[in-house]
Amino acid sequence: MSNYKLGVVVGKFQAPEPTESHIALITSALNSANSVLVVIGSNSIKTEIDLIPYEVRVELLIRALYNVFNTPKSTMGDVIRTISRIEFTELVDVHDVPKWSKMLDEKIKNCKYYTTPDEVGLMGGRDSFIDHYFGEFNNKVRFQYFNDGISATNMRQQCSTVFLPDPMFIKGAFYLANNQYPTAYQTVDACILVGDGVLLGRKPNQDKFRFIGGFSDPDSESLEEDALREVQEETGYTGSIDNLRYIFGPRVNDPRYKKSKHCIKTALFVLEAEVGSNFIPLDDMKGGELRLFSKSDLTEDHFMPEHKALFNIYKKNGVFDA
């Protein structure tokens, strides 16, 4: 006999296919309530952990549940009646627990199976939404945690290790790439002053020079930290740094993004290294060259096309003045 008229479960269900834990959660809720509201959480932007659209996740869950209920002893009518006891709804993340709880309350009240607050049970396992809910429904049911050894996180990570030579897989990759918001990727570039000289780098298979730099690290605390890290990684420099300062943040006409909706924007820094230091081309510069140029001798012709504009910005800001 069911304890509640309506059971409520909440999850992201962001996996290539529902895990055993996902299905066990929903079937356990069906055993504890006459009907179940499955609230599917969504992010407003697509990330590597919020990739699958809401409608697709609903379809995947229905297919998986159909396979569970379609046993030799069941009839099609039994399967349809069981699945019809489930209602799906989407709840977009707001990153505000009280507001999210209020939004969840509204979803519950708008469910076609809702009757009274006392007949609603919030249902989940260990580390489920019920530990972070502060709304007006008080009945909470905690199921034994279902651990099948394969989590949605593990499934997503496994998918990222191999690019399959399959047309549907490739179509999915293009779908993802073309449904991202246009993004300006953050980089840093450092003009390294060494006395009256400027240290520049030349990458392998390139015939002109560039400022030392690279992409910002998501784990760093600042762009300044990124700039110092790039200097060390690409030149091997471990001496003291003086007068580190920010100059400007321009868009870079990087040829790798010429036909892309994405682009690069960089943060330009200037810093002073110790005269007489030993610089070694490492990382992106390995196999290339590091060379000191006189400030007064530098012109646009020394630079790769995408760094000519950066040179002119530094020059306009007086970086190469005597």
Image (spheres, rainbow, N blue to C red):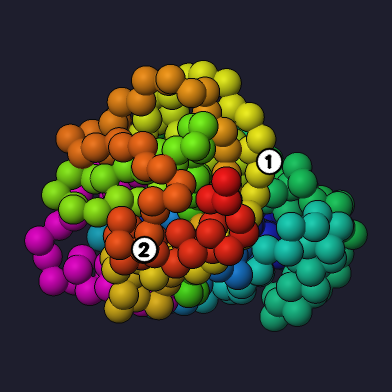
**What crowding class fits label 1: few (fewer than 14 Cα within 10 Å), some (14-19), or many (20 or more)?**
some
The circle drawn on residue 300 is 2
Question: Looking at numbered disc 1 in the image, what kind of residue is underneath it?
Answer: Arg
Badge 1 vs badge 2, beta-carbon distance below 8 Å: no
Can the viewer see residue 68 in this picture? no
80, 237: nearer the viewer = 237
Q: Is residue 158 magenta?
A: yes
User: With 240 as the anchor, is 113 left or right in this view?
Assistant: right
SS at mark 1 in the image: strand
Q: Position of residue 262 (x, y in %)?
A: 42, 71
Q: Is residue 195 magenta?
A: no
* First of labels 1, 2 by sequence position: 1
**What crowding class fits label 2: few (fewer than 14 Cα within 10 Å), some (14-19), or many (20 or more)?**
some
Real-space CA distance between mark 1 and mark 2, rounded to the nearest whole angstrom: 67 Å
The circle drawn on residue 142 is 1
User: With 157 as the anchor, is 296 left or right in this view?
Assistant: right
Main SS of the magenta part reads helix
Residue at left offset 41%, top offset 43%:
294
